Amino acid sequence: MSKLSPLPLRYGALTGSVIGFFITLPLVWLDPWFALLPLLFGVLITVGIYDLNQRAHTISRNYPILAHLRYFLESIGPEIRQYFIYADTEERPFSREQRSVVYQRAKDVLDKRPFGSLHEMYHEGYEWINHSLKPVGHDHSDFRILIGKDCKKPYNASVFNISAMSFGSLSANAILALNHGALKGGFYHDTGEGSISRYHRQYGGDLVWEIGSGYFGCRNDDGTFDEAKFVKNAALDQVKMIEIKLSQGAKPGHGGILPAAKVTPEIAEARGVPVGKEVVSPAQHSAFSTPLELMTFIERLRKLSGGKPVGFKIAIGHPWEWFSLVKAMLATGKRPDFIVVDGGEGGTGAAPLEFINRLGMPMTEALLLVHNTLVGANLREDIAIGAAGKVTSGFDIARTIALGADWCNSARGFMFSLGCIQSLNCHNDKCPSGVATQNPRRSNKLDVADKSLRVSNFHRNTMDALANLLGAAGLNHPQELGPEHIIRRISENEVQPYMDLFRFLEPGVLIDGKTDNPVFVKYWDSARADSFDAPDFVRKLRETKLH
């Protein structure tokens, strides 16, 4: 006869609940309020019995009741790490220091720090801007860049603007606050591919209308481009530029599906789709399929908009595809007025983990490639470049412009100014700050008047910080920033300015065929203006593992 083993300790919570139930049950006769105790133990017993019998979670079967404590701690793990474990300078994805300075500038309170830097200045990757013994004073910080200088209606944009975030991804009150803040501060608000909603229009702040593969706001019933609807929206005085979204940093090469349940009357109105029906955003555009066709489409939109600047947003992937676009510009003489480079570190769009972590070129390398290609093709002076990718401070703007951008966009920075606490619940409709949710019980708590002021404050104070940096460096305008101004530590005892750390092309070298930069040597000549297809040698590599 086999000996029965004692009840495992892991069943202790269930066993204790059973004992507690029977011990506290007689107490009910003394006072009815004591009924709460056996009721509590009864609930725990029910949970424990369910855990033992369900088959979906092995941990719950092995640790009845106790497993739920683990699940709870796991669910609040991000918050615990964010508030109690991470250091102020650890970026996950934004550090407490990065978020705090946005909050302080948005609230227009003191953003100074005492007792020195928290950063490890002798660690690899630390960066700074060199100051001058001949500093410059600035009487304003409203730095601007003219975009579309050859258009009938060029746009004089701030060098710091709100990046693309759609109504639907953000709440109505968040859109209202962002646009009203943009109006107060004199900077633009990118609509995101969800098109122009009633909330974008209510206050009249400057808009950049982003058009994605779903052609929201300018689509036929079958999802193709509708010229008449485009003209109607593009003619709005509030719309200052048109941006064709080729890809975005958060999920490049990835389409999307808006479930029927999320297609509310307001979202349907903005996007031009039926209420309560699933909406598909294809992974690629239907209005063009080659680089040459894209250039023709850009010219068409510029004409239809009455001469407003038209450009595209791109997250860089295969370099030959980007080179094909530039070759199409050279072949046709048609070109965008601007290009927005979206870094792979972009993040307001929820995406699969692999897309977030391992797909798309980070902003630094992507911006360098775009800037260098346009310089080498003698196109840089005709095309303005914007860049987006974790830009939240004056130094972030300075280093990005030094790498080759003309202006910067920020999405998450302005979300923080609205009160976002980085809870990482953007995708499940449970945003605690009412920013990234369509739940009115949450979003209605976001006060538009207060938050719009914070959006404007954040922009103004960040631009003031940029002006102070420029002044200390002896510069009059962000356009004077170059790769010689930003220094990076590459080892404990060696530092280099960007101009030595990165390779920069001379004007026209791609036309003359005189560059030895490896990426251009490898892909430039084989890129084609009439196709995004991979070069022959790349296609052959895909056919075999013998390489």
Image (cartoon, rainbow, N blue to C red):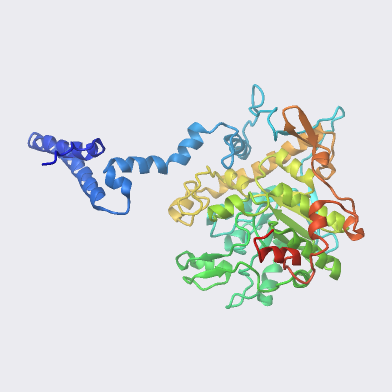
For the residue pair 1 and 469, the one nearer the viewer reads as 1
| Camera sees residue 353 | yes
Figure quadrant of residue 284: bottom right
Q: Is residue 537 left or right of residue 353?
A: right
Figure check: 131 above or below 520: above
Image x and y of residue 454, in percent: 61, 43
Q: Where is residue 300 in the image (x, y as percent from the top left)?
A: 76, 73
Residue 49 horizontal/vertical position (percent): 21, 48
Q: Which residue is drawn at 66% across and 62% down?
A: 210
Q: Is residue 83 above or below residue 356?
A: above
Q: Quick one: 173 or 8, which is closer to the camera? A: 8
> To which quarter of the image does residue 44 belong?
top left
Answer with left or right where residue 498 lies relative to residue 65.
Answer: right
Q: Is residue 14 above or below residue 359?
A: above
Q: Which residue lies furthest to the right in this view?
A: 512
- Which residue is located at x 54 percent, y 55 percent? 350
Left or right: where does residue 342 sit relative to residue 497? left
Examine the image and state in which quarter residue 285 appears: bottom right
Location of the N terminus by quadrant is top left
Left or right: where does residue 334 sit relative to residue 316?
right
